[in-house]
Image (spheres, rainbow, N blue to C red):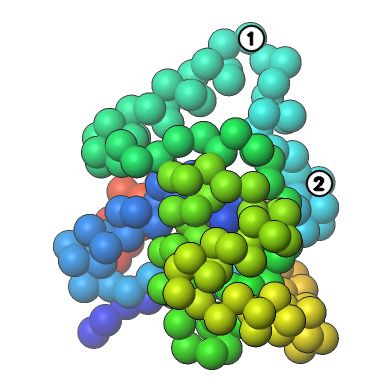
Amino acid sequence: MSKTVDFIFDFASPNAYLVHKIVPEIEARTGASFNYIPCLLGGIFKATGNQAPMIAFGDIKNKPEYEALEMQRFIARHNLTDFKMNPHFPVISLMLVRGALVAERDGYLMKYIDAMVDAMWEQGLKLDDPEVLHKAYADAGFDADKIMTDMSDDAIKAKLMENTNAAVARGAFGIPTFFVGDEIFFGKERLGQVEDMLA
């Protein structure tokens, strides 16, 4: 019987990008499928009192350096050499995530995610600038005008709030978060545990 992993996802997280790039490997090994649930990381932080690691741990001696080392190890292990830290980080992801919900509604969510994670974490684009975002959509072959218009629909806004609130209600406090049934796992470092649960 096929299993599903709910992946609480936002483009704002570099770790979500890193996980996204190795999801196909995990799906191939386990026979499971990852169900991406677009949420707003800022909304999760606000609801839970959490902060971005660079803020929460920025003043702790040696911890930021260790976090950077751990990220580099992950990148090297999985040969994710196209990754680069976005020079505009942190990029406000509200438009991007609303656009993802438009793409989900219209049937091309994974193509959208593939294109936009690359624009964010490989090309280093400032995707909270509407003009830059519009061009990124067009360059990816999407109907840029339609996405930019539809992301302002009340139903899309409501869906984003619903997804984000539901993730928090399930126990999420950050991204990437994974659910296998009722079991929660946080962070790319827990992917081994996710695979164990799937097995």
- The residue singled out by tag 2 in the image is 49
Residue at the image point whose x is 65% and y is 38% from the top: 89
Where's residue 90, x and y in %? 68, 40
Q: Residues within 10 Å of mark 2 (few under 14, many from 20)?
A: few
Residue at the image point whose x is 64% and y is 47% from the top: 126
> Residue 97's quadrant in the figure?
bottom right
The first of marks 1 and 2 along the sequence is: 2
Q: Is residue 157 left or right of residue 87?
A: right
Where's residue 110, x and y in %? 42, 73
Q: Is residue 31 left or right of residue 182?
A: left
> Residue 153's quadrant in the figure?
bottom right
Q: Is residue 68 above or below residue 36?
A: above
Q: Amino acid at mark 2?
A: Gly
| Of residues 165 and 110, the one drawn nearer to the viewer in this rendering | 110
| Of residues 36 and 170, the one drawn nearer to the viewer in this rendering | 36
Q: Amino acid at mark 1?
A: Lys
Residue at the image point whose x is 74% and y is 29% from the top: 55
Q: How many marks?
A: 2
Q: Is residue 135 left or right of residue 107?
A: right
Q: Is residue 99 left or right of residue 73?
A: right
Residue at the image point whose x is 45% and y is 82% from the top: 108
* Residue 199 seen in the current view: no
Indicate the secondary structure of the residue bearing disc 2: loop
* Mark drawn on residue 173: none
Indicate the secondary structure of the residue bearing disc 1: loop
> Alpha-carbon distance for marks 1 and 2?
22 Å
| Of residues 177 and 15, the one drawn nearer to the viewer in this rendering | 15
In the orientation shown, which residue stands out farthest toward the left? Answer: 29
- The residue singled out by tag 1 in the image is 61
Where's residue 76, x and y in %? 27, 31
Say which quadrant the N terminus sits in: bottom left
* Residue 72 seen in the current view: yes
